[in-house]
Image (cartoon, rainbow, N blue to C red):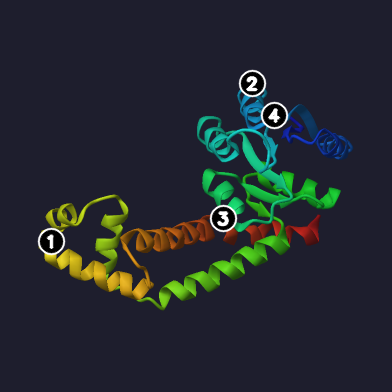
């Protein structure tokens, strides 16, 4: 068993990247194996060096989220930890949905970055605590807002089929109801969502489903690393 946690770093700011590397090299259980400056570099590092943890910036050349998804599906032993200045909720949700195991804001202290790396390396999820609280707070507000919509079982059933790209006629055929009935329920859904058309309705609910899934799979697990602070 390797006594080190092997780390790859991908960031297009050389000074910052080297600063992170120097901070990590001071820890006896951490080993920086390779560095890069783009999403493509991160993919190559993951494939060829197989680090335990791949640190990646959100804003750098290339398809960052596509690379995160590639690494987590094709090289699952490599855990991805985002290290970024971006406090965009969309960036965080996209990264976590793509499979990143952590989201840490630059400016984090050396000990907290080390804690995040160790947490992710052992399979936990870590999000900068203050940012995690913000995400969770906004998620709860969004969840409460959608719950007030109170779709019926049939309404939700129909909008889910519509979200897959089915036409009213195709939904009617699949659910063994009339096309007129589908139109009626879609009108009810759009009224409840205050949507002007089916595209807006689907977009609103997709956003909720995405928040719900990410909140369930990722944000809730951020509490464990935060609790671990007291024992570090």
Coordinates of residue 139 in the picture (x, y in percent): 55, 67
Depth check, front residue: 173 or 26:
173
Residue named by callout 3: 218
Residue named by callout 4: 1
Residue named by callout 2: 48
Q: 190 above or below 174?
A: below
Position of 100 with respect to 175 (left or right) is right
Q: 75 above or below 133?
A: above
Q: Residue at x 61, y 58 (%)?
A: 89
Coordinates of residue 87 in the picture (x, y in percent): 68, 56
Q: Residue at x 67, y 55 (%)?
A: 127
| Secondary element at image label 2 | helix
Residue named by callout 1: 179
Q: CA distance from mark 4 to mark 3?
A: 28 Å
Tell which tag, 1 or 2, sits nearer the viewer.
1
| Secondary element at image label 4 | loop
- How many other residues sit within 10 Å of disc 4, few (<14), some (14-19) or many (≥20)? few
Q: 49 above or below 166?
A: above
């Amino acid at each position: 068993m390797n006594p080190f946690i092997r780390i790859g770093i991908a960031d297009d700011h050389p000074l910052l990247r080297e600063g992170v590397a120097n901070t990590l090299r001071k820890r006896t259980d951490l080993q920086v194996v390779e560095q890069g400056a783009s999403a493509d570099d991160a993919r190559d590092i993951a494939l060829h060096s197989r680090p335990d943890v791949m640190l990646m910036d959100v804003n750098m050349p290339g398809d960052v989220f596509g690379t995160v998804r590639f690494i987590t599906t094709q090289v699952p032993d490599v855990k991805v930890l985002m290290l970024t200045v971006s406090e965009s909720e969309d960036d965080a949700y996209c990264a976590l949905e793509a499979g990143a195991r952590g989201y840490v804001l630059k400016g984090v202290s050396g000990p907290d970055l080390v804690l995040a790396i160790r947490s992710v390396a052992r399979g936990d999820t870590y999000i900068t605590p203050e940012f995690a609280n913000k995400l969770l707070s906004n998620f709860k507000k969004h969840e409460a807002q959608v719950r007030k919509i109170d779709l019926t079982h049939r309404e939700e059933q129909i909008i889910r089929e519509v979200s897959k790209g089915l036409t009213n006629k195709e939904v009617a055929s699949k659910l063994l109801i009339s096309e007129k009935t589908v139109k009626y329920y879609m009108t009810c859904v759009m009224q409840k969502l205050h949507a002007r058309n089916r595209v807006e309705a689907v977009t609103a609910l997709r956003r909720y489903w995405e928040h719900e899934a990410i909140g369930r799979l990722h944000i809730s697990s951020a509490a464990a690393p935060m609790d671990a602070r007291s024992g570090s």
